[in-house]
Amino acid sequence: MVQVRTFSLPPADRGEVLRYAGCRRPGQAERQLLDGCLEELGDRLTGRVCWETFPVFAAEGGLDLGFAVTGSRGLGRRLCGCRRCVLFAATVGVEMDRLIARYGGISPAKSLFFQAIGAERIEALCDAFCIWMAEELGREGRGVTERFSPGYGDLPLALQTDIFRALDCPRKIGLTLNGSLLMSPSKSVTALFGVTDGPGRTGAGAGCAACEKQDCAYRK
């Protein structure tokens, strides 16, 4: 059964926002612009997540995830030893898209910073959900692995259609997918992580260090 929960977002990580904005050596002007954008945004964002747990089985040439079969080796490594996985979709809503569009033609710099804030905010929401799930599963003596998203490593973006079908994202959290596999609202994420029978596997070897895409502009 698909579950839905609203999450409060932590304060924005200004360093991460500046990184997403491509500011390697931000000056006073960039920091003031960021402060102004964050002040304008205020507390308009609401984090919404829907999720469901699925069994994980070995299949010919890959993994049977219950809602789809995939041959992704990267996901296979991430889910190694896991008998279940949690599939989820998260969004911070349409307000970020409205702000990005509003300033796109009149202040490209502000539009860029709102893009960066949106990227940081959706990552913060995903982190909050994963931490919460780790705490919930920890009470049962279980843990979680790092999350893995379509388009990450060798996991095809086409898996989005199966994910949206499995989670009923439009009805559950108002998240839609178009024919080009782009999500709306744009500041949204779909992902899955494994459920371990003991302590979780997070931290080392995760994130950018585990990604095969070496030319990513956001690589840490």
Image: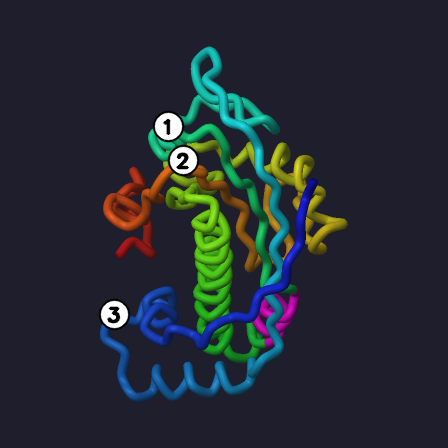
Which of the numbered marks, if any, corresponds to residue 81? 1
Image quadrant where one finds the C terminus:
bottom left
Q: Nearer the viewer, residue 28 or 206?
A: 206
Mark 3: which secondary structure? Answer: loop
- CA neighbours of label 1 inside 10 A, class few (<14), some (14 to 19), many (20+): some
Any magenta on residue 210?
no
- Amino acid on which disc 3 is placed: Arg
Q: Is residue 12 left or right of residue 77?
A: right
Residue 62 shown left or right of residue 183 in the figure: left
Residue 186: x and y in percent read 58, 57
Residue with the mark numbered 2: 197
Q: CA distance from mark 1 to mark 2?
A: 9 Å
- Say left or right for 44 vs 116: right
Instruction: Using the image as rendered, state which of residue 62 and residue 101 is in the foreground.
Output: 62
Q: Position of residue 128 (x, y in %)?
A: 47, 61
Q: Magenta: predominant secondary structure element?
A: helix
Amino acid, disc 2? Asp
- Residue 145, above or below 175: above
Res. 24 mark:
3
The mark lying in front, picked from 3 and 2, is 2
